[in-house]
Image (tube, grey):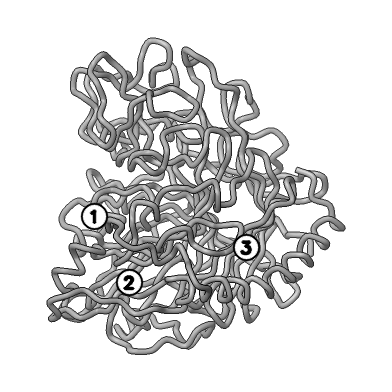
Amino acid sequence: MRFSRSKLSIAFSLLALVAVLVGLTATWVLRGASSPVHAANAAHTHLDCSNTNSICAEVGDPERFFGKDHYVGHDEPSTLFYSNAPGSGNRMRYALTLPKDPTPTAPLTSGKSYNFQLHPALWFGMALCDTQSFPELVSNCTPNSDKNIVDPAVSPNHPGTAFVELQFYPPGWAPISIGPGISCDATKWCAAMALFSVQQNALSGQFNNADCQAKTGVESANYAFITRNGVPHAPPDPLNATPATFAANPATDLFMGSGDQVQVTLHDTPNGLITVLNDTTTGQSGFMTASAANGFAQVDFKPKAATCTETPYNFHPMYSTSSEKTRVTWAAHSYNIAFSDEIGHWDYCTGSAAVTSGGNCPTTNKEGNAANTEQAEGGPTKANPAADDTTCSPSSVSLLVKVTGCQGQNNGFDGSPYQPVWPDGNTTLHPTSVQFTSPLTGVNYNVNYSRFAFEADLPRIEFNTCNRASGVGCTLIPTTDDGTAAAFYPFFSIGNSNGVCTWRLGNHIPGSTNDFHQNQQYGTLLNLNYTAVGGGVLTLLEDFRQVFSSNPCQAMA
């Protein structure tokens, strides 16, 4: 990773100029004569977050939204960044190096892994205003303001909140367009702005009308790939989204190579939050603005209406700063500004029985095969797939690595993400780690975040063993469905790359200077307050978290 002070300064200056221009460009293009955002006669579809979708944001207390023992879809080890500097909650810049995969082999080598097996996505996040989202008790939200900080233990009247994830998708497996797939290309990464809201009144428990529940879901999403011209290649809004919305388009979208160095910028504009990606390896760039002009919209919360409607909307950041208090009060995690790796999905499905895209792994198949089994990776080999081996895809549709697998929930904690096949310096068998700098904030992106935290939502997803009221059965290393501890859980570390401090995630990565005591870094059980249906406060243990008093990995301004 070769980020020098001079290169960073030049790149940041260029991004600042791009960021000023893109809001104007996006608005101008979308007001032209013909925009692909308003494609007619296309079949509507939406992200079904009630069905363990690996793209959706994890909600807190999901039983109230989706039913008993519901797992939205992923384990999320995260790094949180805190600062009292005005703007730190809505304006930041990172330097990112995308991971590389080992060379594909056929048949698969025992113990080999690829990025698509470890994480369906990695992302940078932020809280946003959405006056039609949970808790539905306040009709306004002042953007970029800490006036929006309201503890549910003090009052239920928190402004309506959305959460945006700038998601990066790994290459090499089934296409993202077919549902179980997660890849945009055989060898290239892509990225999307995924913006989530929740349609429920916190006090009454009332959901939006039946038409909205059917067409957008209780957890609705605005979704757009990052494009080279800032124009969505298909409708991003919940009511008009089509299959093309969730399918990468190489003609318009920004594709990035494994190992590419990418400058990542998020900040507010008059038209809404903008995300800018500048691939300094290739010289290409892309961006997206969460604006009404780009087709983004909030689902109108009208529980008594017969028909679902929405309003074009500019989504602005919610908070001025970032701290333990700047929360999304419907989410499982406690953060505003954070990096997260979505894990907890991939499992093998091998055998003679045919696998249908989107279906379950047949009971006559196995989790693994003779060439590459979970036992070889350090975990058990099962004669029959578990009930969590869902949303599978056959090897025949894979873009590069011909392997059959499942991307549904892995609440048995025995799939590839829970084996010691994470980045560890063995690039013949395992990927390299994602590397990213701490964010920089301020008008000129020259102010570091003073504190940080590690957080993992393990209690939220250990619903087979964890009592989230008492903490009994909640463990830092998840318990598998046979009652033993998972073989592995990834941990963050820091190290210097050509004089620049970067965060990494994986196993023991060569060059790391601090691993924060490995899995102990996630700290202790965290109580989070939620507004209870009927009034009062519901306190749940949703996460492990450890807050550090200083940031040891300062970025270079």
As drawn, 423 above or below 318: above
Foreground of the two, 222 or 377? 222
As drawn, 77 above or below 531: above
Q: Secondary structure at mark 1?
A: loop
Q: Is residue 1 visible?
A: yes
Residue located at (37% from left, 67% from top): 237
Q: Is residue 89 visible?
A: no
Nearer to us of marks 3 and 1 is 3
On the rendered image, what quadrant is the C terminus found in? Answer: bottom right
Q: Which residue is mark 3?
A: 276
Sequence-wise first label, 3 or 1: 1
Amino acid found under the numbered disc labelled 2: Asn
Foreground of the two, 523 or 437? 437
Nearer to us of marks 2 and 1 is 1
Q: Secondary structure at mark 3?
A: strand
- Find the distance from the CA under tag 2 to the CA under tag 1: 23 Å
Dot 3 crowding, Cα within 10 Å, few <14, some 14–19, many 20+: many
Instruction: Give how far across and how far down residue 105 sits, in percent.
Output: 53, 16
Residue located at (42% from left, 11% from top): 371
Q: Are marks 3 and 1 in contact (CB under 8 Å)?
A: no
Nearer to us of marks 2 and 3 is 3
Q: Which residue is mark 2?
A: 529
